[in-house]
Amino acid sequence: MRIDCKEAWDALSAYLDGEIDPVLRAEIERHVQFCEVCSAVLDSTRNILYLTADDRVFELPGGFRERLHAHIDEMLQQDSP
Amino acid sequence: MVEIVPTPEMQASQDLRQEQEAEQITRIVAGEKNLFHDLIRPYERRIYVTAFSMVRNAGEAEEIVQETMLKAYRSLHSFRGESKFSSWLTAIALNEARACLRKAGKSTMVFLDEEGDDGEGACQPFQLRDWREIPLEMLERNNLAGLLQDAIQALPEKYRTVFVLRDVEEMSIEETAHLLGLEPGNVKIRLHRARMMLQKTLAPLVQQASPSQRGMWAFLRRRP
Ligand SMILES: [Zn+2]
């Protein structure tokens, strides 16, 4: 089996999640060794996912926790679960 | 989450956490109300991020978190532990976020484009030839965080929801599927689409945003 760029893109997400059949995985790894486009597409996608998981991308507003727990305290005084 | 397969140790600590939570919940319902603070503390950040990713407004996101916690507390007695407490909270937050979008008239007609486009293909990445790791300092300097938030916000809702649960909240495919009432196969397809759309939007922006750094690296590489 030899895959082309399109097939490599279609399998990209599964590849990044490690949820991919080993034969296809090996094919992708072989393909990106000589295809600089797919190699860059793979790296950029992976990098974007790392950024997404970085705590600094979504910062909590200042005082968020204090406000939330003060709000919860108020609620606890009024309500029962 | 990228290439992380849960180890038996991770699984064991998750099971322990679920047991502890079940005990906390029983005690809260029995009257130890103040334990509710501890119960939700591990999740307040991700619930905020989920809400923010959906509505892209800090004030509204904060209100959604407060409303979510309120609803969770009031229906805590009905939580049966069939799903994880964290998923249950997320489900409440998603409903609140959707209600908020609907109220603001920002709802992107979810069901109109529901049919037919979960098939394969039709999604091409931005084709570049060279990619270097984005250095983390660039996050602050070039407002990459803002670009990423905008790009997530611009995804059609059905892709955005899946992306947020899976890649922001780091839920598994199965949890995501269960929470949204989808087949795991559909979750995978939507996730793939969402990631490709983000790559397509962000890769060219990031390339433009960092010419000086790329130049600097090239200079460093040329030195003996
Ligand atoms: Zn290729």
Image (cartoon, coloured by chain):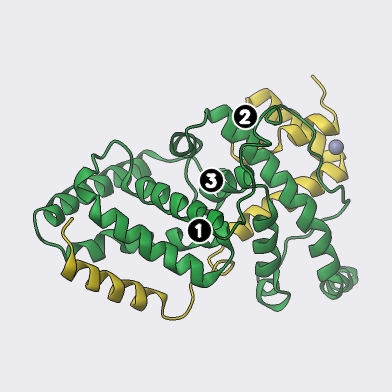
Q: Are marks 1 and 2 in contact (CB under 8 Å)?
A: no
Number of residues whose C-alpha sits closer than 10 Å to that of mark 3, classed few (under 14), some (14–19) or many (20 or more)? many
B224, B177: nearer the viewer: B177
Q: Is residue B144 above or below residue B173?
A: below
Q: Chain of mark 1?
A: B
Which callout, 1 or 3, points at the residue further toward the start of the chain? 1
Q: Relative to B200, is B86 on the left or the right?
A: left
**Residue B88 percent location from the top left of the image:** 35, 46
Q: Relative to A19, is A25 on the left or the right?
A: right
Q: Chain B: what color?
A: green
Three-letter amino acid code of the residue under disc 3: Arg
The verdict on label 3 being within 8 Å of ligand 1 is: no
**Residue B144 percent location from the top left of the image:** 70, 68
Q: Secondary structure at mark 2?
A: loop
Q: Is residue B149 above or below residue B11?
A: below
Q: Are marks 2 and 3 in contact (CB under 8 Å)?
A: no
Q: Chain of mark 2?
A: A
Q: Residue at x 71, y 78 (%)?
A: B141
What residue is shown with label 2?
A: A20
State which image quarter holds ligand 1.
Answer: top right
What residue is shown with label 3?
A: B166
Q: Quadrant of residue B45?
A: bottom left
**Residue B95 percent location from the top left of the image:** 45, 49
What residue is shown with label 1?
A: B100
Three-letter amino acid code of the residue under disc 1: Cys
Three-letter amino acid code of the residue under disc 2: Ile
Residue B200 seen in render: yes
Q: Chain of mark 3?
A: B
